[in-house]
Amino acid sequence: MARALRSFALFSAVILGCGALTVAGLSFTAETVAKVAASSPVKTTNRKPSYVARLPVAKADDLNVAKSVPVTPVALTEPAPLAVSPAPAFTHTVAVEAVRVRSGPKKTNPQVFTLKGGSWVNVTDTVRGWVLITDETGRSGWVYGSLLRPARSAVAQIQ
């Protein structure tokens, strides 16, 4: 109730104030407002906003990494001979467009990664039609065996 009375009192005060100004002879027309606005001093500039970031220009000497990284000489010793291991002979290729590699030998196991068709894999174990494979990058997982085809020869792998 108090809120309604307060709103009514405020409305009444505004109406009475406007009525008093009108009786006093003041009239606010669009023409009067335009004249007042035109005569008021307004500081204007012709600058338009720019949304382009201005980055400082870097000098070539500032970008020379060789100056900023200290180089310490290292005593050279004869390196140990590298053990050359033969490249792994992949036993199968993916026979379909893509195959989902799973974490276990069941269709309900989560997918670990996907292999594209023609990818080389090495089969290491078999469980109920599922095979454990290792791909060219060393990742391993389970794939259903019928989605793979035996590799033809080691020469075809190199090409």
Image (cartoon, rainbow, N blue to C red):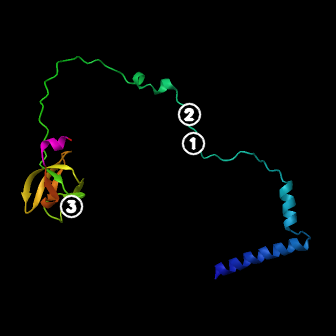
Frontmost residue, 35 versus 144 = 144
Residue 102 is situated, as x and y percent measured from the top left of the image, at 18, 58
Residue under numbered circle 3: 110
Residue 116 x, y percent position in the rendering? 25, 53
Question: In which quadrant of the rendered image does the C terminus lie?
Answer: top left
Measured in 3D between alpha carbons, the distance from the residue under mark 3 to the one under mark 1, in whole angstroms, is 47 Å
Q: Amino acid at mark 1?
A: Ala
Mark in front: 2 vs 3: 3
Q: Are marks 2 and 1 in contact (CB under 8 Å)?
A: no
Mark-to-mark CA distance, 2 and 3: 51 Å
Q: Nearer the viewer, residue 159 or 42?
A: 159
Helix, strand or loop at mark 2: loop
SS assignment at label 3: loop
Q: Could you tell me the amino acid type at mark 2?
A: Pro
Q: Which residue is denoted by mark 1 in the rendering?
A: 53
SS assignment at label 1? loop
* Relative to 152, residue 58 above or below: above
Give the answer, above or below, for where 74 lies relative to 103: above
Residue 45, image x, y percentages: 75, 45
Q: Tell me how far mark 2 sits from mark 1, CA to CA.
A: 10 Å
Residue 29 quadrant: bottom right
Viewport quadrant of the N terminus: bottom right
Residue 107 is situated, as x and y percent measured from the top left of the image, at 17, 65
For residue 56, which numbered disc appears in the image?
Answer: 2
Q: Alpha-carbon neighbours of circle 1 within 10 Å: few (<14), some, or many (≥20)?
A: few
Image check: 69 left or right of 11?
left
For the magenta stretch, what is the residue range?
Answer: 152-158
Which comes before the other along the chain, label 3 or label 1? 1
Q: Indicate which disc residue 9 carries.
A: none
Q: Residues within 10 Å of mark 2 (few under 14, many from 20)?
A: few
